[in-house]
Amino acid sequence: MGGTARHLRQTSPTRAPINAVTVTDPELLKRLDETIPLGRIAQPAEIADVAVFLASDKAGYVNATTVTIDGGLSQWSTGL
């Protein structure tokens, strides 16, 4: 197991990395969803909407920041 996968298993609330196995296994997905304050993983369009905004003129004053798109997961978790 690689270092990143090992770290995720040790630190994530579900003890499993978020990958194709996680999202296709109903039990792992349920456990993951329960750890996210919004109760589900993001839809691709939700991630894309932020990327489109950041690439647009409307984000012209946005500078030197990190936008976390995780449904609130990082505010509840330590070590992510």
Image: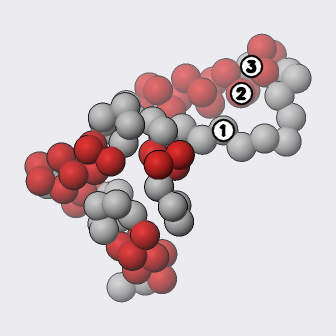
Read off the residue under disc 1: 67
State the image quarter where residue 2 is shown. Answer: bottom left
Q: Are marks 3 and 2 in contact (CB under 8 Å)?
A: yes
Q: CA distance from mark 3 to mark 2?
A: 6 Å
Q: Residue at x 53, y 29 (%)?
A: 48
| Residue 23 visible (yes or no) | no
- Mark 1–mark 2 distance (CA, rounded to whole Å): 9 Å
Could you say whether the residue bearing mark 1 is in a helix, strand or loop?
loop
Colour approach in the figure:
secondary structure
Q: Nearer the viewer, residue 63 or 32?
A: 32
Q: Are marks 1 and 3 in contact (CB under 8 Å)?
A: no
Q: Please state which amino acid type lies under the numbered disc 3.
A: Ser
Q: Nearer the viewer, mark 1 or mark 2?
A: 1
Residue 50 coordinates in the image, percent (x, y) = 60, 27
The residue nearer to you, when weighing 77 against 52, is: 77
Residue 73 as seen in the image, left or right of residue 62 = left
Q: Camera-side residue: 27 or 51?
A: 27
Q: Residue at x 45, y 36 (%)?
A: 71
Q: Quadrant of the N terminus?
A: bottom left
Q: Indicate the amino acid at tag 2.
A: Leu
Displayed quadrant of residue 49: top right
According to the picture, the residue beneath numbered tag 2 turns out to be: 54
Secondary structure of the residue carrying numbered label 2: helix
Q: What residue sits 26% from the left and 44% below the top?
A: 34
* Mark with earlier residue (1, 2): 2
Q: Position of residue 67 (x, y in %)?
A: 66, 38
Q: Is residue 12 left or right of residue 53?
A: left
Task: Give the left or right position of residue 26, taking residue 73 as reference.
Answer: left
Find residue 55 and report its horizontal and vertical position in percent. 73, 26
Residue labelled with disc 3: 56
Instruction: Sort mark 1 into few (<14), some (14-19) or many (20+) by Cα contacts within 10 Å.
Output: few
Q: Is residue 62 above or below residue 27?
A: above
